Each structure stands twice: as C-alpha cells, then as structure tokens.
Image (cartoon, grey):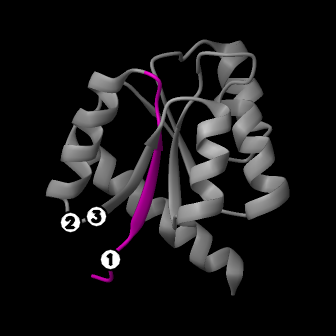
Amino acid sequence: MAELNILIVEDNIIIAEDLQYMLEDLGYNVVGIAMSYYEALDLLQEKKPDICLLDVILKGEKDGIHLAETINEKYGTPFLFITSHSDRVTIDRAKLTQPKGYIVKPFDPTELLARIRKCLRKSHSEIQ
C-alpha cells in the first residue's frame, strides 16, 4: 500500500494521539494534529495531506464543519468527520459539506480502516 498522509483535526489531545497511534499501527502516516480551525489551515497548506479526519466540534469560533467548507472551496482534500455528536441537527449540517464519511466516537481500528478505505475509493471514483 502506498503511504497515505493523514491530517487529524481534533481538539482533545488524548483522543488525537490515540487516533494517531491507531492510524500508524494501520500503516498510515499522520502528517500532523491540528487542534483548531486555523491550525488545520496551516497544516493543510504546509503538509498537503491525502485525507483529513475532522472533529465536528472544535474550540474557537470556527468548528470542523466550517473547516470542511473551506477544504471544499480551497483544497479538495477528501475528509471524514469523527465526532461524538450524532444528533440530527449536527449530522444534517455536516452532510451539507459532502463528507466521504461520518464516524461516531468511540470507534475501533477495524471500523476506522474500513471508513478510510471507503473514503479513498469514493474519492478515486470521483476523479475518474
């Protein structure tokens, strides 16, 4: 498998680092962990990840859904939402950004791997 570069956007450092270890154990390269909208923008520009994992709720005035809108407008990088918020309002708002998937925390490595692979297949088929 070609090395896949992943950006994690998660404002809880314990969850972010746990996710990083999980991804690295699955053979992926984590290019960075962003804890805010603006930090994520810097890493997107600098690291140019292949895929982003975005928490919906971030500290600060702009959340993960705002970030998804910016990613769609400026970068075109595929993304998955990772969140503990599964209420209808949040899901409906997130759907408007056309994510490649939505994972509700907590999740296990098998589910994470399946969602990332599905995201990549969707992105690849959209390019062709």
Quarter-wise, where is residue 88 in the image?
A: top right
- Give the CA distance from mark 3 to mark 1: 6 Å
List the residue tagged with mark 1. 3
Amino acid bearing label 3: Tyr
Q: Is residue 99 above or below residue 81?
A: below
Q: Which residue is mark 2?
A: 27
Q: Are marks 3 and 2 in contact (CB under 8 Å)?
A: yes
Residue 45 appears in view: yes
Q: Which residue type carries mark 1? A: Glu
Residue 106 in picture, x, y percent from top left: 30, 24
Q: Quadrant of the N terminus?
A: bottom left
100 within the magenta span:
no
Tell me which residue sits at (45%, 61%) in the image: 118
Q: Quadrant of residue 64?
A: top right
In magenta segment, residue 8? yes
> Quick check: 41 left or right of 57?
right
Image quarter where the C terminus lies is: bottom right
Q: Are marks 3 and 1 in contact (CB under 8 Å)?
A: yes
**Which residue is rendered at x = 32% and y = 83% of the image?**
2
Instruction: Name which residue type carries label 2.
Output: Gly
Disc 2 to disc 1: CB gap under 8 Å:
yes
Query: Seen from this angle, which residue lies furthest right?
Result: 73
User: Which SS class for mark 2?
Assistant: loop
Please identify the quarter of the rendering in which residue 33 is found.
Answer: top left
The residue sitting at the left extreme is: 25
Mark 1 Cα shell of 10 Å, populated few (<14), some (14-19), many (≥20): few
Q: Secondary structure at mark 1?
A: loop
First in sequence, mark 3 or 1: give its number. 1
Which residue does the numbered mark 3 point to in the structure image?
Answer: 28
Q: Of 114 and 2, which appears nearest the observer? A: 2
Give the x, y percent position of residue 3.
Answer: 32, 77
Q: Which residues are magenta?
A: 1-11
